[in-house]
Amino acid sequence: MKSKQSKRPFIITWVVVAVIYLAVFIAEQKLPATSMLFTVLKKGATYALVAVSMNLLNGFTGIFSLGQAGFMLVGAYVYGIFTIPVELRAQVYQYYDGGLVQFTVPVVLAMIMAGLAAAFFAFLIGLPVLRLKSDYLAIATLGFAEIVRAIFQWNNLGPLTNGSNMLRLFPNFNDFNLRDADGNVTVYLSTLIPFIISGVCIFLIVLLIRSNYGRAFKAIRDDEVAAEAMGINLAHHKQLAFCISSFFAGVGGAMLAMYQTTVQAKSFTTAMTYEILLIVVIGGIGSVTGSVISSFLFVACSEWWLRFLDEKQMIGDFEVPFLRNGFRLVVFSVIIMIVVLFFRRGIMGDKELWDLGSGAKKQERRAAK
Amino acid sequence: MSKNVLRLENITMQFGGVVAINDLSMRIDEGEIVALIGPNGAGKTTAFNCITGVYEPTNGAVYFHDKVIAAAHPTGKMKRMYAGNDPEKFKGMHVQMTPDKITHMGIARTFQNIRLFKSQTAFENVLIGTHLRRTSNVFSATFHLNDKEENRNREKAMELLDIVGLADVAEEKATSLPYGKQRRLEIARALATEPTLLLLDEPAAGMNPQETIELGQFIQQIKNDFNLTVFVIEHHMDLVMGISDRIYVIEFGKQIAEGTPEEIQNNQAVIDAYLGGNDE
Ligand SMILES: Nc1ncnc2c1ncn2[C@@H]1O[C@H](COP(=O)(O)OP(=O)(O)OP(=O)(O)O)[C@@H](O)[C@H]1O
Ligand SMILES: [Mg+2]
């Protein structure tokens, strides 16, 4: 007897993914480009990648890091610095004589560099910190995020980072649209491309999680002492998980730069890390699908569906009470508290889309015996 | 004379002022089943933890196949608190291997307070035990270029489950299994690391008499099938007397007797230590 999983749930998952991508593509051609839907989809795809990368570490390896915003910042800057067209650099780096870097690299390469830069910082942090038994990583990464935010705004680094001024004019999602000679868009791809980038990265993370290394990560999460007794080198595997997680956070940072069209260090706050942590918790710690679904829900709520809470609303002559600027955040906090108190396992628990229905599968197998 | 597998020299393990092991020396030769017995709190589990690198001994040395895997002597604050013998003997030697390295060298163990990977199935628990002998790196594993090795490991894990009689519960969550099965699963997981020395910490705890008898036969069988040397901590005297070639008895961290089962059964110090206080 050999333990082999049925292929069917995976086929269903692939079909679902294909349908979603097709729907995104068609919607983009048919609906006005200014629709709120696309804002949500682009930012949602970006956050989905960052949330999954955080889940790889916090959910699957069981090490708690709070550095996501810091690694995204590094990624966003590396992407921006190396992709601003040379002829536009004088304009962007107006206070720094056009800046230091006087070449550009292709977008895909810049995204990989963004990831590598983030992973490199993770490696440096992990070297001393991950050797310690206790959980100092949360504090170290939180500190790291604060420090890079300050350093990237430092005037002396201006020729590289543009100091406290923003980086802009680098290729963004809209540049992926195909245009005719007059500059009119013929095929819209500005939402599909972030979906593809994010999808490929998340697919890689899922492959990793399902490999023997992923099993080792989960073993460490479940019981460090037992994992070590099974011959798993804790420091090495934690370092791996940390660097890989940070790599994808860096790529996510590059995507965020493309989404925002500008990059400014001061916007990568600790609050951003907490947002992502919330997405992970709401989606289910240890579930990739959960993180993805909850990213889109979270972004849709914060950018779109709950916007009305911040504006005065009239029903006839009646002014609905409480609705004013800032009320959205109150409602948000209440939702979060409800989730944390009563739905601690989140939307998906630690299940994946392709695990659903495996209960039925098991029964089938029993019946077959 | 057969080859030496494990040797402890003057091991003392002190937690602050508490001396858990006091100047313990022992040797285990190839192919032996050796038992370590003693009353509760005698320091048996602590001895295992010193051998497997979980604890760094305060003083003494551990050899595995004549290679030092741990060596230490009291330093710093411990110098003043040290209550054992020979604080100078191991000066100039300092070796502390991490548990994973020691497992790599061929020592595998089970835990007294079962430590299975709780989110994983029985099958996955055993499969994790194969990870340390991998030839894949993180890239080849992610891109599933190591399918051959992966399939071999899966087959091996399934075989091991079959050997411990758990093939029918392979897909169950490990922690949902009854106690006795969890203990056998821990043995399968340990065997997956391809050990030459197997340390079992109270493998019969929580088992009924019938299961205990079967376990005794099972330990002898895997010893032969996998060419193992076995070091076992156990309170069930029938089991210990039935399978052991030799027995070490410790009390308050100190060795009080060593010998064959017959010698131990007739040893006055052992009878005194267990008198009226027979655990079972
Ligand atoms: N990490 C530790 N810190 C402090 N004291 C410890 C530690 N580990 C063990 N001890 C002490 O060492 C002594 C021996 O404990 P140990 O667990 O080795 O006993 P044991 O012989 O395995 O007993 P049992 O039969 O109950 O399993 C005990 O007094 C225990 O309190
Ligand atoms: Mg014990």
Image: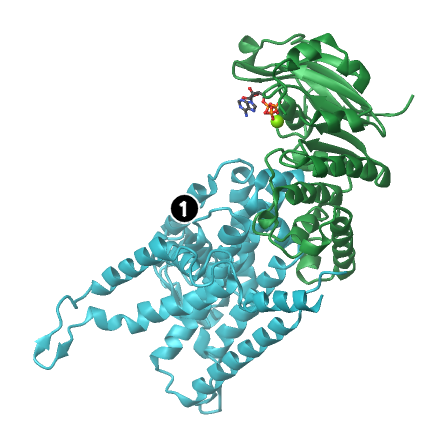
Location of mark 1 (residue): A142
Name the foreground residue: A89 vs A150: A150
* Label total for image: 1
In which quadrant of the rendered view does residue B152 lie? bottom right
Judging from the image, mark 1 belongs to the subunit labelled A
Which of the colour schemes (rainbow, by chain, secondary structure, one colour) is used? by chain
Residue at image location 57% in from the left, 73% down from the top: A13
Name the foreground residue: A211 vs B204: B204
Relative to residue B9, is residue A196 drawn left or right?
A: left
Residue at image location 80% in from the left, 29% down from the top: B243
Q: Position of residue B204 (x, y in %)?
A: 68, 34
Please determine whether, in this image, residue B241 is positioned above or below residue A304.
above
Q: Which chain is cyan?
A: A
Res B238 seen here: yes
Ligand 1 closer than 8 Å to label 1 CB = no
Res A162 seen here: no
Q: Position of residue A55 (x, y in %)?
A: 49, 56
Farthest residue, direction left? A317
Name the foreground residue: A76 vs B124: B124
Q: Which chain is green?
A: B
